[in-house]
Image: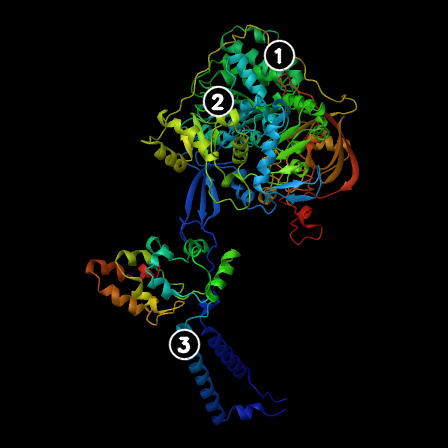
Amino acid sequence: MSDPISRREFLKITGLGTGVAAVLTGCGPASRYVKRQPYSDMPEYTMTGKSTYFATTCGECSAGCGLIVRTMEGRAHKVEGNPQHPVNHGGTCSRGQATLQGLYNPDRIKAPGKRASRASTEFSPLEWEAAIGLVKDALQNTQSNEIAFLMGLFPDHLYDLVQLISNGLGGANVLRYGTLGEFEARVTLIEASKNLLGVAKIPYFDLANTDVVFSFGANFVETWLSPVAYADSYGVMRQGHTGRRGYFVQFEERMSQTAASGDEWFPINPGSAALLAQGLGFLVAELKTGTVPIAYANVDISQVAKESGVSEHDLRRLAAIFVDVPRQVAIPGGVPLGQTNGLAAAESILALNMLVENLGKEGGLFLMPDSPLNPNQNNTPSATAEISNLIDKMNNGQIKVLFVHGVNPIYDLPKALGFDQALQKVPLLISFASFPDETAMQADVVLPDHTPLESWGYQKIITGSDRTTISGLQPAVVPFYNTRSTADVLLAAVQSIGGNLAIGVNFTDEVDFLQKSVIGLGDQGGFFSAPTQESFWLLWQQYGGWWKSKPDLQSPQIVNSLDQPIHLENARFSGNENEFGLSLLPFPSPNLGDGSAANRPVLQEVPDPSTTVMWNTWVEINPLTAQQLGVKSDDVVKITSPVGEVEAVVYEFPAIHPKVVAIPLGQGHTAFGRFAQGRGIMALDLLDKQQNESGNLAFMATRVKITPTGKTRRLARYESREGVYGPSSPLERE
Amino acid sequence: MPDLKIWFKRPRIYWIIATGVLVVFLVAGIWGLIAVQAAPPQPFPYTHAPHIKIGISCIFCHPGAVRGQSAGLPTKAKCDGCHNNIKADTPLLKEWKQYSDTHQSIEWVPVALLPDFVYFSHQPHLNEHLDCINCHGDLSQMTTAKPQGYWTMGWCLDCHQKMAPEKFVKLSDCATCHQ
């Protein structure tokens, strides 16, 4: 066949065609395809293309890190740490970074509403005026001792205001509770500090300047007390001093992220931390002075070695390491305090500091000064014992109105405490939640508060800062929805009640209360000076709070000379050892915390630092134990405790004591929006309601047994995304 | 099948194709020029003229020009500032009121657009006391804004050249506008 068009000619014709087409389309102005849509309600101060920055305080946990929020055209775009802030020095944790996903969360409660009946899905909208009327009626027509406010761990302006209102009413029940507070056993730590140092405060550990750290289960790079502050100090200890590098030893049943960054890690036997601290104290005293104080006198080192699992040789070596340096500190973390003998553990560990005389010395232990705002206010949160007490009152019908803010008790409290059932006896439950969490889904009335980036406020810093600090909150954006600040709701209700109550709580709104509270700080020697009250308020907002220009930590006075034996009982466990052979260690997830961050998809997707698991709950089992049980990674097992049972997926974790299984908190929500709901399990469902001497939850005191179910479910891990995308996932990398 | 090679190779066909291509290019070019110079259709016939006539400064609605790169477009809230007090009794105002009541923003089509490779900021030009009218034309005679035919590099440089010599050093540097 003759070729009608040669190859060359064909190319010429096609080229020509393409050229003409390109010219014809290209000549049209591309700009005409662009649309410019101005914001309908953009704040006046903003300028297109330029960012406006606001200094505020993080509301994700109670540490109170300073934030700088970058906003553009009235929308928050990015959150970073405030470099001047004395808590976090410019750092944030993953939860701080994810705070925007709270603000923009699609599942927020957008307007106030009322439920037809308890836990009903029939939710009718409510006008704010009517809502305030309801709060007013509740406050006015109920005996003050029949009203309870259950609030989060934050020592903030709302807590101070509620205290004031409670006093005006004649003494309502005001409780502050947080799961993280229980897992740090704050009340125990504060009581130990009171018994040994005479001051009921959380001590400040000068990690940055020390040479040797003995940490007993303190997960300070994850969630403990003020993780950004302590992680920062830890960095300084390791790399911030020329010629010396701090040495870090962690005693903990499981290798947490913090333990993983240490020089030595000892997987001690469950319940043995108090005894171990006493053993170390005995040896340290012997090395330091040659005489052992009575507090440690009855210690038998070989028994300590046997019970704790740390060899006698290691004990003597560690004691020598602790004594041989000029600066050292021993930190009581949450895990040893979450035993039934937690107070004795806390005292034994704190007393190690007294033995080496590091109180008030560089690299040692300090106390933060009293807060200049309401210095007499009790900043100790409520322990599980107090919550138990409240639950008893609820069961007896002594609580008629329960206000809940900043906490999600139905999810947060162990099932064994029976909060769910007790709630049925409370006629009116009012929730101020921003998200449809488990408690808000039950509440008769939901009056949504703003999220922290839309809120005013202050937060008293009670841990992690080396100076007196009051951190300030201000709205970085105008509230997106028909939400209202809880302080404003309460103040409006109080004003409409009138009488002596309104005279005692005489503030027009939240900002008025804040201004009247903080403006007095102007003449207390902060790092900025303001000639007038107005300028103080402006600078307060500009810097994101007020703090001293220099560290003002106090040196504790020793009130206990360790001449009494520390009363140490053996740790008790729920469940006998023959039937329930493994100790359960629930721990706050480094990303999801206590579960209040589970509705942030970015945090669900961030792999856990130790296991790389995401979007689910796993149970960490030592491979030796797993072999004995006949299970392997990705097998679904049933975990049974004396009070409950759950199913979770096994992750074989070599860095855990063979007698311990660990389960992270954070998942297992039955509500709380699309990202959190129906995912994983809640480890606290397994816990018995045992408490330690101070009333904190003894979360380490429950034994469990594990039985295979025969089912398998691949965990969603960084290396294996099958658990998220299903077995036929093209993203599967293995 | 006809022998394509034969008719395609004829000189007459060659000429016809060449002329055809030339015409296409010419028409496309002219159409392009007209299209970029014409005021684009806007979703709402906002009228600049009456607003300017009652003495509202350009900067009141486009304050970004004084402070930065982009002049910006006014928000609905800004319009509300005055129009909440003005009765919406004309069809135009009624149409606008619908946007306002539904918090819907108007999707404007940009008029004064420079190519992506040109860096331009309003601020320095206003600092040198240029008036909006110098570049954007007399908006007191316009409804929606119209493109001005002279936005070319030569026109920019004409003006830059008239500046003091020490300033012209920077103002004639390519990297000033083509960063």
State which quadrant residue A654 falls in: top right
Are labels 3 and 2 on one chain? no
Residue A724 falls left or right of residue A296: right
Q: Residue furthest left?
A: B165
Q: Which residue is mark 1?
A: A301
Q: Chain of mark 2?
A: A
Residue mark closest to the camera, 1 vs 3: 3
Residue A668, can we see it?
Answer: no
For this rendering, which residue is in front, A300 or A1?
A: A300
Q: Which residue is mark 3?
A: B34
Q: Which residue is mark 2?
A: A204
Measured Cα–Cα span from mark 2 to mark 1: 30 Å
Is the residue marked by circle 1 packed among few (<14), some (14-19), or many (20+) residues within 10 Å? many
Q: Which amino acid lies under the numbered mark 2 shown in the image of this protein?
A: Tyr
Q: Chain of mark 1?
A: A
- Disc 1, SS: helix
State which quadrant residue A299 falls in: top right
Could you tell me residue A47's position as x and y percent?
40, 52
Q: Which amino acid lies under the numbered mark 3 shown in the image of this protein?
A: Ile
Could you tell me residue B38's position as x and y percent?
41, 73
